[in-house]
Image (cartoon, rainbow, N blue to C red):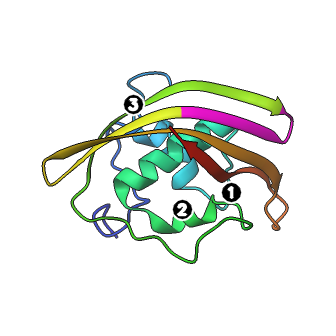
Amino acid sequence: MTSAGNPRAAKGGEPCPCGGRPAGTGFGACCGRWIGHFETAAAPDAEALMRSRYSAFVRGDEPYLLATWHPSTRPGGLDLEAGVKWLGLEVRSHRTTDETHAEVEFVARSRLHGRATRLHERSRFVRENDGHGMLRWFYVDGSIS
């Protein structure tokens, strides 16, 4: 299946939507290693998970977004708005409060029908067993500024 038919597939040198970590890293070496290998690889920290979730929004990967959402707050589905152009991500802070809890503050910019928007959120994450023997970070919720 091509990358157009599979949002998890990645072209070799495609830039990562999150901006790369470190800057300029390609999708496959950045968020693609979590998104494309979800069953066997877990993001190492809350910031990496948040960046991969941003990339999944850019790529329209609803299954990954739902799988990385904590079951206690996970919606039944997502209504990903068609035509949204994601313009960039700025991670402002990443704070681990203990070995199983963390917060990430970020600003994501997008445009829809010519109207620019800015999402400023402080997201909460929890690290726990995923029910299949893997310890992984999950998005819980966020406070929008």
Look at the numbered disc 2 and give the secondary structure of its residue. Answer: helix
Asked whether 54 or 29 is in front, the reply is 54
Q: Which residue is mark 1?
A: 40
Q: Look at the image and tell me whether residue 45 can be seen.
A: no
Q: Is residue 120 above or below residue 131?
A: above
Residue in the image at 68% along x and 49% along y: 42
Q: Which part of the image, by quadrant, shows the N terminus?
A: bottom left
Segment colored magenta: 98-105
Badge 2 amino acid: Tyr
- Please tell me whether residue 43 belongs to the stretch shown in magenta: no
Residue in the image at 67% along x and 39% along y: 46
Q: Which residue is mark 3?
A: 19
Residue in the image at 25% along x and 55% along y: 84
Asked whether 43 or 81 is in front, the reply is 81
Task: Check disc 2: other Cα within 10 Å, few if <14, some if 14-19, many if 20+.
Answer: some
| The furthest residue to the bottom | 76
Badge 1 amino acid: Thr
Look at the numbered disc 3 and give the secondary structure of its residue. Answer: loop
- The earlier-in-sequence mark between 1 and 2 is 1
- The earlier-in-sequence mark between 3 and 1 is 3
Label at residue 64: 2
- Measured Cα–Cα span from mark 3 to mark 1: 24 Å
Q: Quadrant of residue 67?
A: bottom right
- Measured Cα–Cα span from mark 1 to mark 2: 13 Å
Q: Look at the image and tell me whether residue 50 can be seen.
A: yes
